[in-house]
Amino acid sequence: MSIDLRRATVSDLDVVQHHRDAMFRDMGVDPAVVAAGSPGGRAWLERTVASGQYVGILAVEGGTVTGGVGVTWLDLPPNMHTSLDRRGYVLNMYVQPAHRCRGIARLLLDDVLSVCRDEGVEVVSLHASEYGRGLYESAGFTPTNEMRLSLHAVVDHPRGIGSGTGFS
């Protein structure tokens, strides 16, 4: 069966959010935590798909959506990697389990990178799950030194900010 790629529209947001939730569950995130984030994620998708801030790409086989990926545009200052202030951030890569290992993720990644090129973006980043790391590395992505801090978790941290935690 052939795989067709098409752009996601506002009418596809339920399937995009379903893919996003399933992606996080597959990565081992507690389903209750995933469910708690869904309404906000859905609202963000509705706003950003409508405005063009998020471009979603869906893989369709026989009329059924079997996978998807998206890119959102980041407004960041130019730096040593790019003279531009616009970058692409790839997210929501997901292929339904029954359709994996058939090249769908590669097709989706190639298409989303084409969208980035068409938009004139020079730098694209993403967070890779262990499942996707090989795919992204084979496309030329390299690891970076990014770190993350969840501020609501630090506030609740018994040592607090600036108390030997490395924050000042």
Image (cartoon, grey):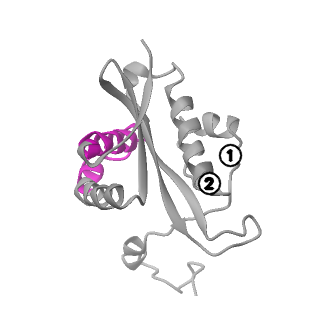
Question: Would you identify the image quadrant in which residue 136 lies?
Answer: top right
Mark 1: few/some/many CA within 10 Å (<14, 14-19, 20+): some
> Badge 1 is on which residue?
141
Tell me, for residue 124, which label it has, or none: 2
Look at discs 2 and 1 and give the one toward the viewer: 2
Quadrant of the frame with the N terminus:
top left
Residue 153 on image: x %, y %: 39, 71
| Residue 25 among those drawn in magenta | yes
- Where on the picture, by quarter, is residue 44? bottom left
Name the residue located 54 percent from the left edge and 51 percent from the top edge.
127
Q: How many marks?
A: 2
Q: Does 167 sit above or below residue 25?
A: below
Real-space CA distance between mark 2 and mark 1, rounded to the nearest whole angstrom: 9 Å
Instruction: Name the amino acid, label 1.
Output: Phe
Please tell me whether mark 1 sits on a helix, a strand or a loop.
loop
Judge by depth and name the residue closer to the eye, 115 or 130.
Answer: 115
Q: Are marks 2 and 1 in contact (CB under 8 Å)?
A: yes
Relative height, residue 73 to residue 11 (above, below): below
Identified at 39% across, 79% down, the residue is 155
Q: Within the magenta stretch, is there residue 6? A: no
> Which kind of residue does numbered mark 2 sit on?
Val
Within 10 Å of disc 2 (Cα), the crowding (few <14, some 14-19, many 20+) is some
In the shown orientation, is residue 34 left or right of residue 88?
A: left
Q: Secondary structure at mark 2?
A: strand
Spot occupied by residue 10 in the image (x, y as percentages of width and height): 27, 49
Residue 121 vertical placement versus 114 (above, below)? below
The range drawn in magenta is: 12-36
Answer above or below: position of 160 versus 60: below
From the image, give the main secondary structure of the stretch colored magenta: helix
